[in-house]
Amino acid sequence: MGVIAAFAGIYIIWGTTYLAIALAIRTVPPFISGAGRFIIAAAAMYAWLGLREAKPFAGVNVPLALFCGVLLSGVGNGFVIWAQQGIPSGIAALIITAVPVAVLVIDWAFFSKRAPTSRALVGTAIAIAGVATIVLHTRTLAGHAQPLHLLAMLTSVVGWSFGTLLQKRAATAQTVLSFTCVQMFGGGVFQLLMSFVDGEWQHFDVSSVSLVSWLALAYLIVFGSLIAVNCYLWLLTRVAAQKVTTYALVNPVVALLLGSIVLGERVTPLAATSAALVLIGVALVLFPEGSPRAWWARRRAVESA
């Protein structure tokens, strides 16, 4: 049940963060908002870990955790937020769906050297086709993407994918919480440095931050980071990385449903069909060796052994 709950966390919560990020960066510059989000979340985790044990980072490779933080919370998250200033959100969502594909390829080339199954490849292709249809249907591809922002999006995909595979090998089930704390701090510091490089502090006024942006940032800290990031990294200690990264395919579907519920957008039959394609594709990636019931039965057998 823990694995199911963690998947639900990254599928649903990270799907809602598209809206929260858009609200936060209305009055808070991208890298400043990301830095605040992850540094505050890391501080909260450190305080909690300190209450549980005297040496919360015992057994953690701190330099490696910081490097994973630069790749995941820094490049993977920060560059996406920054890039959304110059490219339509639909293009950003479509590019993010390349994460599972990037993980499959990078894992094959640099880590496990094991070729992905044909079923997983077909599932990924079907899911990407579904997301592409959603993006085209909602007409968010209008406009022209700036090359620098497009490059930032592609860099974020590579950074997040490498960070995912590296952390999967560096963190264990016993150290994942402490590793995550250090990782988020590293990503937050990286985004803080990028905020100076980007010159965000020259035109940022704290007094001009709206209540909506503050609430959105608080949501991103608690749900987007403390809950969802921990779910994601905890899953990496128990489930194949290719399966965990299927969140990138489901999140746009969640965003579509959120738009329907919160903003009153109409979900047409074509949109529903596209969402079904995503879910079917994800199922093929998650269960490459048979039915969901058989897969969960094998997991229970392994965990009880």
Image: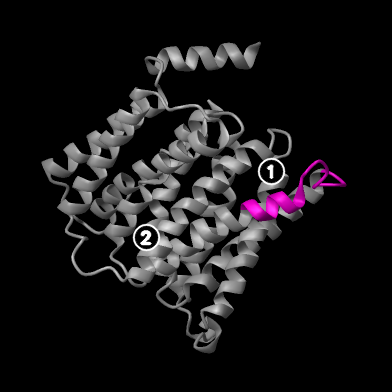
279 and 195: which is toward the camera: 195
Residue under label 2, please give it: 19
Q: Is residue 296 above or below residue 100?
A: above
Instruction: Measuring from the top left, give residue 95's x and y in whole percent.
Output: 34, 53
Instruction: Measuring from the top left, give residue 185's x and y in whole percent.
Output: 67, 59
Circle number at residue 177: 1
Circle number at residue 215: none
Image quarter where the C terminus lies is top right
Q: Of discs 2 and 1, which sits in the foreground?
A: 1
Give the magenta-colored segment's residue range: 53-68
Q: Secondary structure at mark 1?
A: helix
Q: Secondary structure at mark 2?
A: helix
- C-alpha separation, residue under disc 2 versus residue under disc 1: 27 Å
Mark before the other along the chain sequence, 2 or 1: 2
> Hey, what amino acid is under mark 1?
Leu
Tell me the crowding category of disc 2: few under 14, some 14 to 19, or many 20 or more residues within 10 angstroms, Cα based: some
